Amino acid sequence: MEDLFYIAEQFAVDGRIADIRELGNGNINDTFLVMLDARTEKHFILQRINTRVFVDPELVMHNMRIATEHMRSRLELRPPGKSRRWEIPAVLLTRDGRAHLRGSDGSFWRGLSFIEGCRSFETISDERHAEEVGYALGMFHTLLSDLLPDKLADTLEGFHITPRYLRHYDEVLARHSAPGSPEIDYCVRFVNDRSRWAQVLEDAKKRGSLPLRPIHGDPKVDNIMIDAVTGQAAGIVDLDTVKPGLVHYDIGDCLRSGCNRSGEETMAWEEVVFDTDICRAIFRGYLADARRFLTEDDFAYLYDAVRLIAFELGLRFFTDFLEGDVYFKVKQPEHNLVRALVQFRLAGSIESQEAAIRKIIRDLR
Ligand code: GN1
Ligand code: MG
């Protein structure tokens, strides 16, 4: 395969590459920060898309174009001068004018603009940060709230459809023959006790209570860019999973990520709790804008969304562990098992604070 430097150069249309660094800890794609011309301190993002997960990466780029163009047109309608900074990642073109590059080994590469002067965090530091994280998701949903969801393709069939993950889990568990352990037994019981309830959002969708809308799909804390000077959220990145879905998937994902102060990669899974102060601040930031388009029914399912997406991610990690780590990248043999335990502990902590979380939602309504 061509080397990384050669590939980066194809996207570096105006500038010389000074350095390339691996960025973040994505579980699916490989992400690099390319530093241009040390003098100007400009950067861009280079990514290799995992085509085992995103089997039609051109379609991912298509959704990204539709969504970013729509958001840009909505941003331009804001009164000039009055609004705060908000940036939308732009797709970079290669030297021969394409939106992606195919490596000789079939790998799929793309370049994206970097939101300068910003950084992201794996965990939330305080309530101000939490409010900004919520604000960012609310801003994102608001900018897309009048884009018809059928303008976007379904690039990842079954994504966030919990009953489908459960069906797959049942198949994998039935085939699984490796020795058990107290942790595995705990996970099996945890899933089993909740498998009927886990249809909750899909049932509401089928009944017509919750509409499909454009969603981000993965608005975890690390994907919210925070301006280093003002401390304000200035954008949301990782638009691969933008597609039609329920905003509840996004809200649940943002909260399960933000309210776990130990972070989703902690090894100390027994200490994981859901922080309701952070939850209140995220909801406050989110609802500042999003309140305008959410319906009564949307509000009625917010608690379930928070509980469900933590449970669902635990289920996805646990299934992947049982299946031999075929989906999420791992750094050690039991990595996916520990990640599952973290999410299940978090879901349990959410359940034990149900009344408090429902009250937070009611008070902010
Ligand atoms: C994956 O690769 P990354 O970190 O952007 C996953 C998300 C999970 C997340 C958990 C396409 O996202 O659904 O919430 O890991 N993305 C996909 O960290 O499955
Ligand atoms: Mg992602």
Image (cartoon, rainbow, N blue to C red):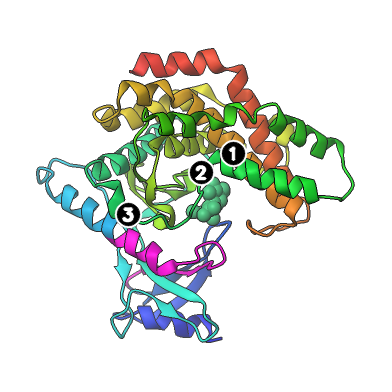
Amino acid on which disc 3 is placed: Leu
Query: Can see residue 313?
Result: yes
Residue annotated with mark 3: 152
Q: Distance between the residues labelled 3 and 2?
A: 16 Å
- Mark 2 CB in 8 Å range of ligand 1? yes
**What SS does tag 2 mark?**
loop
- Mark with earlier residue (2, 1): 2
**Residue at screen point 65% across, 41% down:** 315
Write down the quadrant of residue 323 in the picture.
bottom right
User: Which residue is at 32% across, 54% downward?
Assistant: 152
331 vs 270: above or below: below
Q: Is residue 264 visible?
A: no
Which quarter of the picture shows residue 66?
bottom left
**Nearer-N-terminus badge (3/1):** 3
Q: Which amino acid does label 2 sit on?
A: His
Q: Read off the residue under disc 2.
A: 160
Q: How far apart are marks 3 and 1 (CA)?
A: 24 Å
Residue position for label 1: 312
Q: Tell which circle, 3 or 2, labels the residue nearer the N-terminal end.
A: 3
Numbered-mark total: 3
> Residue placed farthest to the right in the image?
179
* Residue at 64% over, 43% down: 167
Task: Answer whether residue 20 is magenta in the image.
Answer: no
Tags 2 and 1 in contact by the CB under 8 Å rule?
yes
Neighbor class of circle 1 (other Cα within 10 Å; few <14, some 14-19, many 20+) is: many
Cβ–Cβ under 8 Å for marks 3 and 1: no
Q: Do the residues labelled 3 and 2 touch (CB within 8 Å)?
A: no
Highlighted magenta segment, given as a residue range = 40-65
The amino acid type found where label 1 is placed reads Glu
